[in-house]
């Protein structure tokens, strides 16, 4: 049977993690406050400023999401894995809301994310400018072979070698 995009692989159960001071994390996508996540990303995240709601919505549908929640159930943080659940996972859109930063919740969120059983055997990567020490503490290192990595940014693009009509 083919799994619906974004659902956990067969045999992997949904996870809830208990954190400090009654805070908790969960991979249950139904709990995610999408409007709040969108508002934070589009207004506060240096990498996602202006990201449209529809894009955030679709990214949540098709990612393994980890929500961070206060004891009351209010959402206070977010992270997501872009992953095939087998070989590769990209940790993305990690944040803790400003009022809750500095109390260890970011560390708890990252620890929860990397301990998720669905990505445990995958190669894990992320891109960040600040807080590299936080990720180092959780086993991330600079790319060993950055010269092997390339990127293609969204938007109009023409491969230069195809502009030559003789090719
Ligand atoms: C990064 C972030 C998730 C950390 O959350 P947090 O709850 O403040 O993290 P913690 O309290 O667990 O602290 C973890 C470590 O990160 C450090 N840290 C937190 N924010 C930092 C920042 N902006 N720059 C540098 N270091 C930072 C803390 O000093 C701490 O280091 P220490 O353990 O050596 O003292 C949170 O600050 C955040 O959402 N920032 C804005 C979004 C962002 O930059 N996300 C990361 C891009 S992938």
Image (cartoon, rainbow, N blue to C red):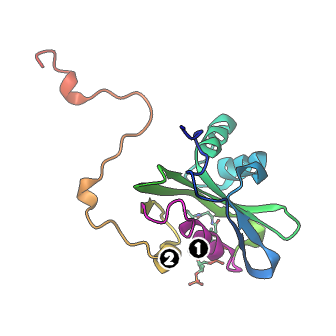
Residue 23, position as x, y percentages in the image: 78, 73
Depth check: give the residue in front, 12 or 24.
12
Answer with the quadrant where ligand 1 appears in the image. Answer: bottom right
**x 22%, y 29%: residue:** 160
Q: Secondary structure at mark 2?
A: loop
- Place residue 95 in its image quadrant: bottom right
Q: Which mark is residue 138?
A: 2
**Mark 1, other Cα within 10 Å: few <14 / some 14–19 / many ≥20:** some
The N terminus sits in image quarter: top right
Q: Secondary structure at mark 1?
A: helix
Q: Which mark is residue 111?
A: 1
Q: Is mark 2 within 8 Å of ligand 1?
A: no
Q: Is mark 1 within 8 Å of ligand 1?
A: no
**x 60%, y 43%: residue:** 59
Depth check: give the residue in front, 85 or 113.
85
Magenta stretch holds residue 108: yes
The residue sitting at the left extreme is 166
Range shown magenta = 102-122
**x 89%, y 67%: residue:** 72
In this rendering, position of residue 5 left or right of residue 41: left
The residue sitting at the top extreme is 165
Q: Is residue 113 depicted above or below 159 in this figure?
A: below
Residue 97 appearing in the image: no
In this rendering, position of residue 2 left or right of residue 152: right
Magenta stretch holds residue 106: yes
The C terminus sits in image quarter: top left
Q: Is residue 57 depicted above or below 81 in this figure?
A: above
Residue 55, position as x, y percentages in the image: 62, 37
Depth check: give the residue in front, 34 or 25.
25
Residue 134 appearing in the image: yes
């Amino acid at each position: 049977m083919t799994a619906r995009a974004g659902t956990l692989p067969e045999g992997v159960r949904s996870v809830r993690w208990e954190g400090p001071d009654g805070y908790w994390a969960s991979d249950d996508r139904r709990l995610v406050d999408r409007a709040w996540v969108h508002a934070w990303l589009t207004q506060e995240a240096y990498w996602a400023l202006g990201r449209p709601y529809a894009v955030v919505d679709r990214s949540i549908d098709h990612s393994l999401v980890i929500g961070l929640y206060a004891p009351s159930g209010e959402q206070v943080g977010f992270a997501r894995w872009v992953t095939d659940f087998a070989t590769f996972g990209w940790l993305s859109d990690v944040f803790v809301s400003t009022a809750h930063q500095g109390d260890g919740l970011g560390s708890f969120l990252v620890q929860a994310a990397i301990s998720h059983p669905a990505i445990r055997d995958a190669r894990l990567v992320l891109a960040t400018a600040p807080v590299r020490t936080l990720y180092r503490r959780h086993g991330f290192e600079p790319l060993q072979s950055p010269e092997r990595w390339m990127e293609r940014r969204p938007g109009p693009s023409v491969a230069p070698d195809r502009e030559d009509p003789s090719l």
